[in-house]
Image (tube, helix red, strand yellow):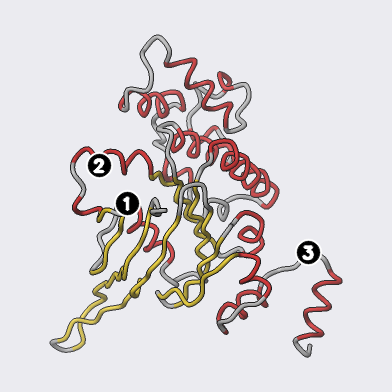
Amino acid sequence: MTPILSARAVTKTFAVGRQGWRRKTIQAVDAVDLHVHEGETLAIVGESGSGKSTLARILLGLSAPTCGDVLFRGQITTALTRHDRHVFRREIQPVFQDPAASLNPRMRIETTLAHVFLRHRLATPQTLRAITIKQLEAVGLVPGDHYLGRYPHELSGGQQQRVAIARALAVQPKLLIADEPLSSLDMSVQARVLDLLIELRRRFHLGLVLISHDLNVVETIADRVAVMYLGKIVETGATAEVMRSPRHAYTRTLLNARLIADPRLARRRRTEEGG
């Protein structure tokens, strides 16, 4: 079965100044290969600066790779026809880390969603309000009409992220690429938004590429995990297998660094590490 989205030897190099007559560069993404199928959740994990967000932007088509290719349903995205590029834009949708920054502060929530529905001809002026309310309620903002007239700054962080997710889902995508969608939220709100993502994935058979540094979140939601270190994918596999038997030293370091809520398990881990 052809993956819905793939990266093939994707590399991204940035110029960071000059050293004498030579241009200094860094490789934020280094020859990355990965794929994700419809309905699958792939988590890309690693510490800050490992290249995860740069890779996410490349997968979304927001940044061009220096070399390598992104493929949509087996076709190189730079070679897509105008129609196929439109399909790509609809089927692959982003959810960003900071929902406040991704929402227009001058637009009411109703206008933000209405713009998407009308642009893609998914509603008529007569049905627009009802569809917008239904969309808000699908992400847990109930009653939906209570939120239509609000501006983003009048919502909590969790509510803003739900609106951002509602906007992404408005075009009925097949895959969400979510770049640290929980990191700007309080812990209690994170749990509720995570539950929402799990429910939406089940209800709509929605694929998800989750960029995260939180292995506890990854373990809860992901089918497969790819571990990224210094721009490279150093390990990939089924989530349970990687969590139980990591092969790469960096993966073991990430696992050892994560917080464990159960104090008995935490003490056991310290004992096993010789602490």
Vertical position of residue 126 compared to residue 39: above or below: above
The C terminus appears in which quarter of the rendering?
Answer: bottom right
Of all residues, the one furthest to the front in this rendering is 1
Query: Marks 2 and 1: CB-CB under 8 Å?
Result: yes
Label 2: state its secondary structure.
helix
- Residue 161, given in percent of the width and then of the height, sits at 53, 41
Q: Count numbered badges in the picture.
A: 3
The picture quadrant where one finds residue 203 is top right
Label 1: state its secondary structure.
strand
- Residue 60 in sight: yes
The picture quadrant where one finds residue 81 is top left
Q: Residues within 10 Å of mark 1 (few under 14, many from 20)?
A: many
Mark 3 to mark 2 CA distance (whole Å):
46 Å
Please name the residue that numbered disc 2 is placed on. 84
- Residue 188, given in percent of the width and then of the height, sits at 70, 48
- Residue 264, given in percent of the width and then of the height, sits at 86, 71
Classify residue 5 as left or right of residue 77: right
Vertical position of residue 224 compared to residue 275: above or below: above
Classify residue 12 as left or right of residue 253: left
> Which amino acid, by three-letter code, is at mark 2?
Asp
Q: Residue at x 49, y 69 (%)?
A: 48
> Which amino acid, by three-letter code, is at mark 1?
Phe
Q: Residue at x 36, y 12 (%)?
A: 125
Q: Which mark is residue 72?
A: 1
> Which amino acid, by three-letter code, is at mark 3?
Ala
Please name the residue that numbered disc 3 is placed on. 261
